[in-house]
Amino acid sequence: MYRKKLWGEKMIKEKIKEYANKIGIEYIGFSSVEFSFDFIERLKERRLNGHLSGFEEKDEFKRVDVSSILSNAKSFISIAVPYRTVDLDYSRPYLSKSSLGIDYHIVLKNKLELLKVFLKEELGAESIYFCDIGPLHDREIAYKCGIGFYGKNTNIYTKKYGSFVFLGELITDLYIEPDYPIESKCGSCDICIKSCPVGAIEKPFYLNSKKCLSFITQKKETLTYDEMIKMGSRIYGCDICQDVCPFNKKAEYSNIVDFKPESWNINIEVERFLTMSNKQFKETFQKTSAGWRGKKVLQRNLIIALANLKSKEGYNKIKSLIEDEYFSYYVKYYLNRLGEFK
């Protein structure tokens, strides 16, 4: 017998939170499945301005059409899991904090699957979950569910871990008493806007994804000289708008073992990185969130990072790639930065 009738609405919510905590979910919130007109207009503005990354669903109405995903949907359940376990040395080529450790898609999907089973077995509820992949907007759902507030950099900020959290959600046909959004606490602070090297945060709470350095490190298209310069020592992703934020200065670190880096991705071995076979790359990167972009893109980014650092680490290997159809352009940039190619 399902416990829905025995527990009542308030107890249902508490029991879900209790189970979530048991499986390592510290932040969980609930909301209705309706979206505001203002949110739809914000999505439309970004699409019309050509500021979508291309990785997300373009049609704003598909992003809010919950009934097409689950008929009779009544509630969102949003979760946030902290991931920052270490600080990074930006004086060397680096992967962003979010790409260290095991791929967050795997970690969060495991937790969401357990929640889905709990909802079905205990409450007879149907549910579907998403984590970063899918038509829904993880951050807006987290905001609706009271997980945290929107920063001006468009990240969601939790009280304990700041914005260093991964988000995921379930849609369920179970009514759950909703939580409420938290108003932004940014005030007059605009340090994230001023600190972005490429001006991707074009105004408070508005990100031009096409400019964002995280997006640029993932582009397969040929990079411009200006893009390469602005990449600095980044191999994958960017943390700067989060690192400079005063709220994140006080944020606690995650103790989730899955997100702790291994020695190879916190201390990039240049020669190994540049010479690894496809098999070695897959064995090394397949469990990380950066691996999906492929070996060549990440090797390209490493060459650019070494160029910007004016480092001769891996020099001979990089120079040997000057005749390679894909790498030649980036090797010339590298040599130019070292003053050896005009």
Image (tube, rainbow, N blue to C red):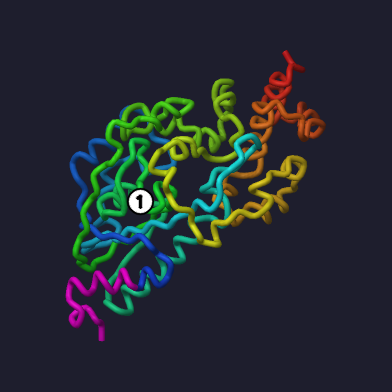
- Which residue is located at x 21 percent, y 54 percent? 180
Q: Eyeballing the image, is 160 above or below 334? A: below
Q: Is residue 194 above or below residue 95?
A: above
The residue wearing badge 1 is 158
Tag 1: amino acid:
Thr
Left or right: 290 in relation to 264:
left
Q: What residue span does the magenta drawing correspond to?
A: 1-18
- 72 in relation to 235, above or below: below
Please provide percent x and percent y for residue 239: 49, 39
Compared with 105, 61 (above or below) is above
Q: Does the image show residue 133? A: no
**Image position of 80 (left or right of 299):** left
Q: Is residue 176 visible?
A: yes
- Which corner quadrant holds the N terminus? bottom left
In the picture as drawn, the residue positioned furthest to the top comes out as 342
Magenta segment, prevailing SS (helix, strand or loop):
helix
Task: Report if residue 90 lies within the magenta region.
Answer: no
Crowding at mark 1 (Cα within 10 Å: few <14, some 14-19, many 20+)? many
**Residue for point 29% across, 60% down:** 29
Q: Where is residue 17 shown, x and y percent of the image?
A: 31, 69
**Residue 168 pos. (x, y %):** 38, 56
Task: Give percent across and percent down for residue 65.
Answer: 25, 51
Could you tell me which residue is drawn at 43 percent across and 67 percent down?
Answer: 24
- Please tell me whether mark 1 sits on a helix, a strand or a loop: loop
Front-lying residue, 75 or 72: 75
Residue in view at x 36 percent, y 27 percent:
202
Q: If the image is split into quadrants, where does the C terminus sit?
A: top right
Please say whether residue 12 is one of the residues in the magenta stretch. yes
Q: Residue furthest bottom?
A: 1
